[in-house]
Amino acid sequence: MIAVQANLLQFLSVPKQLLIPIYQRTYSWTRTQCLQLWQDIERVAQDESIPAHFIGSVVYIQEGIYQATTLPQMLVIDGQQRLTTVSLLLLAISNAISNDAVTHINRDMIRGLYLFNTYGKGDQKYKIILTQSDKESFVSLLDGRELDNMASYHVIDNYHYFVDLIKKSALTLDEIYHGVNKLVVVDVSLDRHNDNPQLIFESLNSTGLDLTQADLIRNYVLMGMTAEQQADVYNRYWFPMEQRFGKTEYARLFDRFMRDYLTIKSDAGTIPNIGGVYSEFKKYIRGKDITEVVKDIALFSRYFARLAFPERNEDKSIRTVLENINTLKVDVAYPLLLEVFEDFERYNLLTYEDFIEILTLIESYVMRRTIVGIPTNSMNKTFATFKRSVDKSDYLNSVKYGFITLDSYRRFPRDDEFMTEYVTKDIYNLLQRRNYLLSKLENHERKEKVTIEEYTIEHILPQNPDLSIEWRQALGDNWKEIQTRYLHTIGNLTLTGYNPELSDRPFAQKRDMEGGFAHSPLKLNSGLGELEVWGAEQIKKRAQSLAVLALDIWRYPNMSDEVIKSYSKSLEVQTDESSSAHFEYLQGESLSLFEVLRRRVLNLDSSVREEFKRLYIAYKTSTNFVDIIPQKSRLRLSINMRFDEIDDPKGLCRDITDVSGWGNGDVEVGFSSHDEIDYMMFLIRQSFEKHTDDITI
């Protein structure tokens, strides 16, 4: 590596061509970065006490062998944003010079020294060759040609921005050029044989826009390939991915997608930090064929794009449920959704009906938890590790069973809990989800769907805190308490196209007027036209009716007790035989018992680790919270808590504070029946919650 300080204009004036490799991100500086550069130039142009202004480094590596009769070509590893921006400014300056202008600079000088190679042929006449669509836009500007519809937005917009700044500036063109002439860079040339461009690229501290994880991964994948390999991999796999995600959203969505992809590929369901995706990718790709990995990434990107942007040509039922999931904004479910998508489309492990049902279960799981008010901060880990529950030879049943056996804050709310909360929940202030909820109620089993956006939400009992005399008389002396308690609940909410007309009118007028409830075509208003009064009892009755409908829309996994019991006994959890085989008593009924308990303990959180010791199996987060000791006629649990801390209403636990033995903790309990597992989990969760940190996203 050779690094020297260089005047930027002198650097550009030397005959050479700077190539932006295809693996580099496209030109992405906005007016914000351009304005900062412009202000720096104006400042140094007017202050002679400032000899130079440093704007960063330009790092490049020689591309191939060149002869004295050809131009040297340099691949730019870092600095394309600065080089392109300054070139756009120089072009704007040159085009601002009129034939009769009084100036010490001229148009041909700027173009001949800094923008073009005077004697270059074909593309070699341009000092800088940008990548992808940026190239055509930049070249068109240089040549003064008309721009096509595929023009690069930032290239064109920033050029016109500089044109405008020059027109409005109080400085002359000579003064502006003088400021540009003070710009200094570090000129860093790399030796392909002795320097590692990727490591240098990672360590550079760029000014302007920070590199995204997508930039780093793309560069890592392509930088080590030959030019021919780069073009092949980029054009076949990478460029279609960028198009799939959309140019403006590419970086944000790709970073999110790669986090989900790496989560899927992690056996433990580990979720990388969004800012650490690149580091995790480098670990994942070690020892793998990089082209095959990119091919796999491209495949999963198709599934991701279909999840994030359901297309019109998507199957109608699939599109509907995907749109519902997106409306709920459950990005954390994507690791599970991507894997299910692959198993359905690539491996045909699911029927069409089963695929729809699994998607619908995910939707129901999220919505039920919203209504019940369970914090969402554990759902990312739930979905990331859910694959542990999936038996791909019995896909749908295993998914249902996996949902049913989720415990505590991960649980799938049952019908009674959901219905109790649903009738009293403040639905109106669910904001983004309230329209989704009302739309689902209105359109359930409708062939001709109602577009919810064409209507407004109507409070049958008005929101006005100063209710009219008619409403107060109808509700009675405790009208204020009724209004406060039921105002925003589902029983008092409906849809209407006549919200201003209905306003705070008495119920009878809202019912009978033109466009009122009695004449409404909406299902949500059915029955309202038959009521004489509207009060607490009517609100509660309607809420119960809508709650029954909600149970049918957001269904609980339908498995009978007999199927659940038989499934839990027959389901075999794959374990490392070299670790479990030496446990003499882990066979028959004891093995079945262990497998069910093991699954439920591992499902507590993705941080739970399992270790097979010589005489017991340990489950730990920061430390062991429970150990299982297989015995001849039962499984013995050693729970890592003080005996006076354990909540044991059945009195089954034994104090082993002063008793030596295998396992950790002062609490011992044994069991030998599947019917006792729920109580064992009640005890184990206490220890888990004691020893684990608060769960965060």
Image: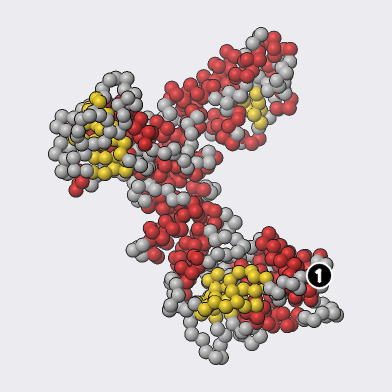
Residue under label 1, please give it: 171
Q: Is any atom of residue 35 visible in this view?
A: yes
| Mark 1, other Cα within 10 Å: few <14 / some 14–19 / many ≥20 | some
- Using the image, determine if residue 565 lies above or below residue 582: above
Question: Who is closer to the viewer here, 35 or 660?
Answer: 660
- Using the image, determine if residue 177 lies above or below residue 409: below
**In the rendered structure, which amino acid carries the disc numbered 1?**
Leu
Report the label total.
Answer: 1
Residue in the image at 81% along x and 70% along y: 171
Relative horizontal placement of residue 509, taking residue 291 as reference (left or right): right
Residue in the image at 77% along x and 65% along y: 165
Residue in the image at 58% along x and 80% along y: 17
Residue in the image at 64% along x and 87% along y: 119
Disc 1 is placed on an element classified as loop
Q: Position of residue 218 (x, y in %)?
A: 48, 63
Q: Position of residue 251 (x, y in %)?
A: 54, 57
Q: Position of residue 15 (x, y in %)?
A: 61, 84
Relative horizontal placement of residue 382, taking residue 165 as reference (left or right): left
Q: Position of residue 522 (x, y in %)?
A: 61, 27
- Using the image, determine if residue 355 lies above or below residue 423: below
Relative horizontal placement of residue 451, taking residue 164 as reference (left or right): left
Question: Who is closer to the viewer here, 108 or 301?
Answer: 108
Coloration mode: secondary structure
Q: Is any atom of residue 531 visible in this view?
A: no
Q: Residue furthest bottom?
A: 69
Question: Who is closer to the viewer here, 459 or 529?
Answer: 459
